[in-house]
Image: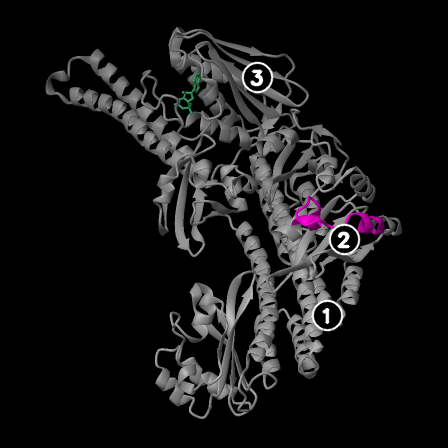
């Protein structure tokens, strides 16, 4: 990674400037990593770069990604950078890494900072950094950005992996398709198939076929391990599959569906056996995972394929059962071809024709598996059919929303382009009771031995016009067959005979149906492939956007839940997908009422946490897609701001009323002689004006802080002297009424800081201590030091602060008692200013308190 020049590195910088530069540098590092991720840098390299970037951006000397260890009870480092750190962190320990993992929130504990790394199904690990100086909130933000980047790139890699696997599977299927089409002797074919399968998709594989009399015959048994091959042969002799038994093949044969055994246990294995000896044999064969699929052609179950993973320890996922089913579909078609051939060839006169047909089908199978491009497959198919089967071939596909599209037109005489143009202006009537729409609707073929142009055009709005336009095409005979795969009709093929004067027969129709069955599988394959690809791309895009996105289907079930939705709600996708909305959101009605692209802000309760979401919901064909962002913080700030406005107006009005009253009295004519009252009124005006300007100063000061216009004037500071002056001034402000005590440890070092700002913070804390001690009680300022920092602690014995509010009192505008029911006035800005100043001095401020007994505010500034 390139290096980033720090501006003016030679000039000594103030702490604030240094902080700003550090932040700038961190932002630059994140941008660089983002760029690397976008240019497809491999995951391992990117993670290594990310670790180095964290080291550099935080000045950390050790950085690591922690992931759950195999025992599930602790976390261990999987990728590390810099000095070695801990190797085992129990999940229930107090370490910030364990805490981040448990609470799924970034954590910071002095010199260690940690951020969660999320994956598709929830948290996958924790990115942690350790250094020699304490980290601040900005550092954690930086760490979180890097963790999110790592998560996004891991997600990208998983999607890539999925795509690669589906490509591999399709490649395998294509290879199997060729193999199955290569011979008409199906015993040979199936044995070769078993050879292809082992060891690529199974450690052993069995092919069983049903004989005409219903008995089962084992056609092929193949094992990668020769010892198992012998065992399988014994099994073959003694335990042929019994339809309806617990045996995997027995189940597949009985149900006509795949029987999937993701992982065998001794008990589940026993359930697949017929007796003790069978169980012993199977235990020796030791299958870890298995899948059995039926061989189905023309609605008949011809047999079953059984695959098992054993010594390789792999397991079958649901996607593997789909691959197995597909393989079985192709094998069944091949067996059916061969049987068709056998029965046809029994009639001598028909044998030549049958051979020609089968040859044609085999050629078609080859063409169909040669490409995964949808349109290319369809055009190749149409070209194959013409002129061997018909003079014209038109292929129709059902598009989105049920529209019927013409996808390929082919003519033996090369006139397809002219006719395609004519057909374009005559869309099909989807509800026509004859022709292509009817075939698609019913799934039944149509044969019209004697057809005419008019009868062929009966499924468009203006049949005469179309028949007229097609005048030169003298239609003689037509056949229309549906394209059916996985029980869904994908489209239809229309064959026309014209100049050849051929009259289609039921044999022709049968061949056309055979062709359509194979074409449908190919079309379905390329669709599945495209969908898998699109889905992988969409998932990647969804996870890259910052808005939470979820999809609710027509039944009210959540289908999609992206990474941002996980981050905002704290609910992992795995825990939400497939669940009804009402079990995820305590109240679903307010969200259901949101329709349209304009976001509305609604309160929702998730896991008893109240959130305000700005949400929009757009209906789609799959349900309603919702996009949302978390505006809880904004709502909170808005409320505080309006409270602040009312507090400040009250604060301003009280002194203004006093000034006004005094001024009116002074202006009265007969006032001249009463000197002592005049002096008192003038003093009152001065005092109230001071109070007014103090409030205005506070507000202006906050403005300056936020505009970045505040520069610290750093110099050597005598902490004891500043504390002494602060206590003295506070005593002057409150008079003899309050007891103020100062304890300064002996031998304090001087520190590099801004004396004026330090004094401002101490004044504020002392004033608060007095203000929130309505019954008096001593207020104490203690100053001491250790080898790391110098510490100021202001302790009072006043009203105290409830534990739940401790973290909030430093927020801007925050007041515990905004409506001043206790009569103590204030703007809610004092502690915010204190915290901002202390952090700019590289220190920290915190509070401990017991309600009713008092509070201690502590500031720690680093010794340097
Ligand atoms: P304010 O102007 O309201 O005093 P601050 O920002 O200084 O604003 O304090 C925020 C809130 O914190 C106060 O409204 C008060 O409720 C609480 N607080 C601050 N200091 C003390 C203290 N020493 N004892 C009890 N409560 C305190």
In the image, residue 590 lies at what x, y percent? 35, 40
Residue designated by label 1:
178
Please provide the residue range marked out in magenta: 233-251
Q: Is residue 87 visible?
A: yes
Quadrant of the rendering where the C terminus is positioned:
top right
Q: Which residue is mark 3?
A: 720
Residue drawn 70% across the image and 60% down it: 168
- Taking the magenta stretch, the answer to whether it contains residue 771 is no
Q: Quadrant of residue 143?
A: top right
Residue 629 point in image, percent of width and height:
45, 44
| Whether residue 557 is situated above or below residue 796 in the rendered picture | below
Q: Relative to 805, does residue 311 appear above or below in the rendering?
A: below
Instruction: Verify CB contact (< 8 Å) between mark 3 and mark 1.
Output: no
Image-based side of 237 in relation to 346, left or right? right
Residue 84's tag is none
**Which tag is nearer the camera, tag 2 or tag 3?**
2
- Quadrant for residue 174, please give it: bottom right
> What percent of the width, then of the height, locates residue 443?
49, 67
Q: Is residue 176 above or below residue 54?
A: below
Q: Between residues 577 and 133, which one lies in front from this camera angle?
A: 577
Residue marked by disc 2: 202
């Amino acid at each position: 990674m390139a290096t980033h020049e720090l501006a003016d590195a030679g000039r000594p910088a103030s702490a604030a400037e240094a902080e700003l530069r550090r932040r700038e540098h961190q932002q630059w590092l994140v941008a660089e990593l983002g760029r690397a991720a976008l240019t497809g840098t491999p995951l391992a390299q990117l993670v290594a770069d990310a670790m180095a970037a964290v080291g550099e951006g935080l000045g950390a000397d050790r950085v690591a990604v922690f992931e759950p260890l195999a025992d599930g009870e602790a976390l261990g480092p999987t990728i590390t950078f810099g000095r070695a750190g801990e190797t085992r962190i129990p999940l229930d320990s107090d370490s910030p890494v364990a805490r981040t993992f448990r609470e799924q929130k970034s954590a910071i504990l002095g010199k260690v900072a940690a951020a969660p790394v999320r994956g598709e199904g929830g948290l996958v690990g924790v990115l942690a950094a350790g250094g020699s100086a304490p980290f601040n909130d900005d550092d954690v933000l930086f760490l979180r950005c890097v963790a999110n980047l790592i998560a996004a790139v891991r997600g990208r890699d998983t999607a890539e992996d999925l795509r690669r696997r589906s490509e591999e599977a399709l490649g395998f299927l294509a290879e199997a398709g060729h193999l199955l089409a290569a011979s008409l002797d199906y015993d040979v074919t199936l044995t070769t198939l078993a050879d292809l399968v082992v060891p690529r998709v199974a450690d052993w594989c069995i092919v069983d076929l049903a004989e005409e009399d219903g008995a089962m015959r084992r056609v092929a048994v193949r094992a990668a391990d020769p010892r198992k091959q012998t065992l399988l042969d014994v099994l073959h002799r003694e335990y042929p599959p019994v339809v309806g038994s617990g045996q995997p093949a027995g189940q597949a044969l009985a149900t006509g569906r795949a029987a999937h055994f993701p992982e065998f246990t001794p008990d589940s294995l026993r359930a697949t056996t017929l007796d003790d000896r069978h169980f012993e044999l199977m235990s020796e064969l030791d299958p870890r995972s298995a899948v059995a699929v039926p061989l189905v052609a023309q609605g008949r179950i011809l047999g079953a394929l059984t695959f098992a993973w054993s010594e390789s320890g792999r397991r079958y996922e649901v996607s593997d059962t789909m691959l197995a089913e597909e393989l079985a579909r192709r094998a069944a078609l091949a067996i059916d071809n061969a049987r068709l051939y056998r029965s046809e060839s029994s009639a001598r006169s028909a044998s030549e024709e049958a051979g020609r047909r089968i040859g044609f089908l085999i050629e078609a199978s080859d063409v169909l598996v040669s490409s995964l491009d949808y349109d290319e497959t369809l055009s190749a198919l149409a070209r194959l059919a013409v002129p061997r089967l018909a003079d014209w071939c038109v292929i129709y596909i059902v598009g989105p929303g049920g529209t019927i599209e013409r996808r390929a037109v082919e003519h033996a005489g090369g006139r397809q382009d002219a006719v395609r143009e004519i057909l374009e202006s005559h869309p099909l009537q989807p509800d026509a009771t004859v022709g292509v729409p009817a075939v698609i609707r019913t799934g039944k073929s149509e044969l019209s031995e004697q057809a005419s142009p008019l009868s062929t055009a009966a499924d468009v709005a203006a049949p005469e016009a179309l028949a007229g336009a097609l005048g030169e095409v003298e239609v003689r005979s037509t056949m229309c067959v549906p394209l059916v795969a996985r029980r869904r009709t994908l489209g239809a093929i229309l064959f026309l005979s014209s100049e050849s004067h051929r009259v289609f027969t039921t044999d022709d129709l049968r061949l056309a149906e055979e062709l359509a069955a194979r074409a449908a599988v190919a079309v379905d394959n390329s669709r599945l492939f495209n969908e898998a690809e699109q889905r992988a791309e969409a998932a990647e895009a969804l996870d890259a956007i910052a808005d939470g996105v979820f999809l609710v289907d027509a039944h009210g079930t959540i289908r999609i839940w992206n990474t941002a939705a996980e981050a905002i709600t704290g609910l992992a996708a795995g825990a939400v997908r497939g669940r009804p909305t009402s079990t995820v959101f305590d109240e679903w009605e307010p969200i259901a009422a949101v329709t349209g692209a304009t976001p509305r802000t609604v309160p929702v309760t998730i896991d008893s946490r109240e959130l305000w979401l700005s949400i929009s919901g757009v209906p789609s064909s799959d349900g309603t897609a919702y996009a949302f962002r978390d505006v809880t913080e904004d709502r909170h700030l808005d409320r505080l701001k309006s409270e602040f406005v009312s507090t400040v107006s009250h604060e301003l009005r009280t002194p203004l009323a006093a000034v006004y009253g005094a001024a009116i009295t002074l202006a009265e004519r007969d006032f001249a002689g009463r000197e002592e009252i005049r002096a008192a009124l003038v003093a009152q005006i001065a005092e109230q004006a001071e109070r007014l300007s103090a409030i205005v100063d506070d507000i202006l000061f906050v403005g300056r802080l936020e505009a970045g216009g505040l520069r610290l004037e750093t110099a050597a500071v005598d902490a004891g002297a500043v504390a002494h002056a602060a206590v003295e001034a506070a005593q002057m402000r409150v008079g003899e009424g309050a007891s103020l005590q100062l304890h300064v440890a002996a031998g304090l070092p001087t520190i590099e800081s801004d004396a004026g700002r330090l004094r401002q913070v101490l004044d504020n804390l002392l004033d608060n201590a007095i203000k929130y001690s309505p019954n008096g009680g001593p207020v104490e300022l203690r100053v001491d030091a250790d080898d790391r920092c110098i510490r100021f602690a202001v302790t009072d014995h006043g009203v105290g602060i409830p534990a739940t509010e401790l973290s909030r009192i430093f927020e801007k505008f925050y007041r515990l008692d905004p409506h001043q029911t206790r009569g103590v006035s204030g703007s809610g800005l004092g502690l915010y200013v204190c915290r901002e100043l202390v952090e700019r001095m590289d220190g920290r401020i915190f509070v401990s308190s017991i309600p009713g007994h008092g509070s201690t505010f502590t500031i720690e500034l680093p010794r340097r």
